[in-house]
Amino acid sequence: MSALATRLSGIALESPLVLASGVLGTTASSLRRVALAGAGAVTMKSCSLQPRAGHPAPCILPWGGGILNAVGLSNPGAEGAAAEIAEFKRTCPVPLFASIFAGSAEEFGRLAGRIAGAGPDLIEVNVSCPNVQSEFGIPFAADPDACGRVARAVKDAAGSIPVSIKLSAQCASLARMAEACQRNGADAITAINTAGPGMWIDTGTGRPVLSNRVGGVSGPAILPIAVRAVYEIRKAVDLPIIGTGGVSCANDALQLIMAGADAVGIGSAIYGGGIGLFGEINRGLEDFLKEGGYDSIGLVKGIAHREDRP
Amino acid sequence: MSGRSLAMSSHEMHTLPVKQVVFHHDGLQSFVFPRAFDAEPGQFVMLWIPGVDEKPFSVSDVTDGKIEVTAKAVGPFSRALMNCKPGDRLGLRGPFGRGFRPRGRGLVVGGGMGIAPLRYLVHRLEQDRASFRIVLGARTAEEMMFVGDFSRLGAQFATDDGSLGRQCLVTSLAERLCEEERFDLIYGCGPEPMLVALKKLADRAGIDCQLSLERHMKCGIGICGSCCVDGSGICICREGPVLDRAELDLVADFGLPHRDATGARKGAPAMA
């Protein structure tokens, strides 16, 4: 058994590294490719009940500190996503996390039921996308009560499949949000979604570049926010945490694990490092464990909280 | 700042003025930008018309301090592009992707708009004193781009209506040349049925091929996943657009309907 093996809500992962939602996650073929590159689990791009084409381009823009994106949740709809899940499960043993988004708790529940039928290993609930506010309003992730209702609806529809709620760092209290998730049956928390939204203006024309004008900020710029968020959530609840945000090397992943994450999402860094990054970070984590005399990655989890204990 | 995912500066957005517009035919124009550009033939750029959209285009030539892109009016974006005049500011990002990797004696095969990037390719092959033959196909003589340039290099032409060269498919010209002469590599860009025929030709002849594929692209940098092929799952925008024979063997949807902007396979039921 590898020192990187871990468990998340009862799911055995060979590595704590998880492909984050929104990156290379539309088709079974691309998810399988990332799984084979060393991800412990892969998360699909968020799907909705009906297909969506998303926003016009430019919708993804690299800049010096990371990436701005307003893809606009393009996806083939529940039926298309379910077909990709089924194909992936038929051809690849690596755990697959579905991701869902909807406009109301009731719709979240209906969608979760459809997706659960395809048999993903976990359902991640995207209540925090900053790119569709004109359409869906302020994300549920800013209001503990609304978020709790979504968690309950999805949990009721998902049967035995574990449910993780994906939170934004931008709320009055991450502790209150996490507690609302736990109280309403969530099995795990994913934190954080992209930050912002942000804007990039082309100075040659004086126009915002993204067609949506604003977009979520990801990449190295948000790593310290993600580390702080995971640290706060770990203080508040015992739920497993998929820590996500700006990770591009083993040291970044270790920060999230030390803050209390059980698994670590990787997304935007694939732009700079390619999918070989999963193997590279796995090796970096193994080297760290060996040098520190740790038998298992689990022994590092949450150690940043030690100083706070009496 | 940790990690290394700083943007390549060529992928950040900068606008610059159109320097020159070359009119080929109604709805078929080239646009020249004043930018020194280090691109391989077969790589592509993203053109942004502020307030309209951003789309990928192959590079039809690179000369000292200038880059040229050639486009045909097919949708709202390319129709808006046809109205752009010298001095208008457009966004130009790139190069993106992996282009042609020339080696040995080449057979260059192009169809329709796929001829554009091959113009830059043959200029480079000529510069490198490589041995190569060219066959090009289009619907009509008017839609055949850069005829003078390609004729100078001995190209053979095929048109659907016989208005230029032979009245046949360009793949027929390619097959005949493969029977008469020895090639190491087939370079191809054009409609996918043409590429499928070229792949079969390469398989039969036992030689390699490098074919430029199209899929629905959004990000251009290999992360959004909208251009991933079925099978191997590679991104056409990053590992492609030019794939070799071994890579094409792993493209399960080669010659089949592709995915649209939602990620659904075209023709597949998409209603929930």
Image: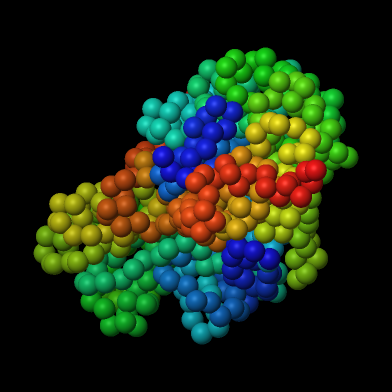
Q: Quadrant of the C terminus of chain A?
A: top right
Residue at the spot x=75%, y=66% of the render? Answer: A202
Q: Nearer the viewer, residue B113 or A109?
A: A109
Percent x, y for residue A186?
Answer: 69, 25
Number of labelled discs? 0
Placement of the N terminus of chain A among the 4 image quadrants: top left
Residue farthest to the left? B180
Q: Is residue A190 above or below residue A270?
A: above
Q: Nearer the viewer, residue B120 or B144?
A: B120
Residue pictured at 70% horizontal, 55% vertical: A223
Looking at the image, which residue is at 31% across and 71% down?
B102
User: In terms of depth relative to the viewer, which is nearer, B240 or B266?
Assistant: B240
Q: Position of residue A231 (x, y in %)?
A: 74, 45
Q: Is residue A286 left or right of residue A167?
A: left
The image shows residue B123 at horizontal and vertical percentages of 37, 77
| Residue A244 percent location from the top left of the image | 65, 46
Q: In this view, which residue lies farthest toward the front?
A: A310
The image quadrant that residue B157 belongs to is bottom left
Say left or right for B162 vs A227: left
Relative to A301, is B184 on the left or the right?
left
